[in-house]
Amino acid sequence: MKEGGWKLTLAVLVLLVSTHADALFSCHMKDFIKAVQQVEDENPELEAVEVLRMLRRTAHLNDAFVQHFLPDAGSSGPELDADLSGYLQRAVQHRVLEGAREEGVVLAPDGMTVAVGPLLLGIEAGFLSTIPGRVPGLYQLTLAGDLGVSIRRRSENGEPLGIDGCWDNLTAPQVFTLSDTASTLTAAQVHGGMDGVILGKEVSAKAGESVKLSSLLTDYYLHQLDAKGMDGAPRLISRRRRELFKILVAPPVLIRQVAKSMELREKLEGRVKMEVRQKRRLMAAVKETMKEFVHVFMECPPIIARCTWGAAPYIGTPTMLSLPLTYLFIHHTASPSQPCLTFEQCSADMRSMQRFHQQTNGWDDIGYSFVAGSDGNIYEGRGWKWQGAHTGGYNSKGYGVSFIGDYTSTLPSQHAMALVRDQLASCAVAGGQLVSSYILKGHRQMVSTECPGNIFYKEITTWEHYQIGTKEVNSKP
């Protein structure tokens, strides 16, 4: 056969193998956990830490920085099925390819995209801990190391922090594309790093207990909420990622760990020790970046982007808001009438409302600025920048936040209310979207409607910033 023929045949075989692997496992966390369980079933003699080391070896997570904290993953060990090995390498080895395609990430059932590498490194470090609750290298391996790399590059070319993206399919995701190619620290890496810290600390605190990696991941990511929603959820689940991380990691601690990670990389790469002036500039950059990081990933609630819940395009040209705004208007959806307890159901409700608003009401888009589910998430409607269609006569003056469900005779979950009352509102103030003296009102105060329901309206009258009248105020701080 001619050389060109061989090359074509090889290309076809590679494509077939890749397609077969994709058919077996998607880039969804539940499929990744199935793959881990298959590794465990095929190697029942291996402890969890040995399974983690095998995954690290498969994905080539074994550079000098990693080996400073973890044992060498080695170059030999139990052999994996070719399809399984190829899938695991693609799922764990993080990289951003041409065209802004991010690999080494999976879609978690909570709606967030998670980088698998830092997650597994944190868990492995936790298993290797000799003192319960104290995990050497935990912060550097999971988050601080990547933050340090990002900060250095930001200081050189101003790269954005924590860029997110969109999946090609929400049911069986395969391709994740970033909204910006310039970021060296993506949202998925942050989520994976946070989870690595949380689970690393957890397994360290339970040193000596036998646990399977697949079971640990299943309990954390795949827990199904009951009718109480997040109010009745266990402590250790991914939907509580941000609150768990805030409990474990104070910002000053993370700043110190980032600085240590940067110094270690300098040493491992044999760079000349920085001058005092250069080191001061870099530390200033660390503090500035960490201020932004704390705001976006620790103060603000988890917000599901439009592309992640499957939004249709805006019809026409949106009107940009003039920030900061003065009002925060509270709504309930009434229809859907039931709270949504999963990312899948909340996303379906968002799409249903958007279709109704666009096709029946003739609006350009879903009317609300944001929508609160009972699954632990806030869903982006028109968002922070664009004028909504939620409160007649006041759409340019405030944000409209709705709660999925009918709250005429019942209340939303305490968790959902806290997400809006305590986190989304403070996030907006800190981010310059709302004035610090913003006014909170129920929809019924502005137009003739029962919204947000009798019981819920009575509840919001007890919230800080609630105002009973309709007197205009200056929208500037």
Image: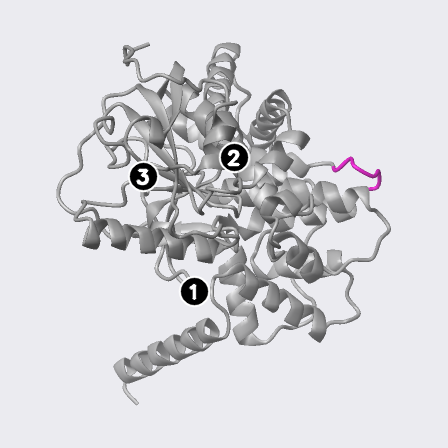
As drawn, 358 above or below 144: below
Q: Nearer the viewer, residue 278 or 91?
A: 91
Quarter residue 6 falls in: bottom left
Q: Residue furthest bottom?
A: 1
Residue 88 in picture, x, y percent from top left: 55, 64
How many numbered circles does the render carry? 3
Residue 162 in picture, x, y percent from top left: 43, 37
Q: Tell me the quadrant of the picture where the C terminus can be found.
A: top left
Q: Residue furthest left?
A: 316
* Amino acid at pointer 1: Thr
Residue under label 3, please give it: 368
* Residue that appears at 24% across and 49% down: 357
Identify the main secondary structure in magenta. loop
Residue under label 2, please give it: 417
Q: Nearer the viewer, residue 250 or 140?
A: 250
- Whether residue 364 sits left or right of residue 221 in the image: it is left
Q: CA distance from mark 3 to mark 2?
A: 16 Å
Neighbor class of circle 1 (other Cα within 10 Å; few <14, some 14-19, many 20+) is: few
Quarter residue 264 falls in: top right
As drawn, 352 above or below 273: below
Q: CA distance from mark 1 to mark 3?
A: 25 Å
Residue under label 1, please give it: 171
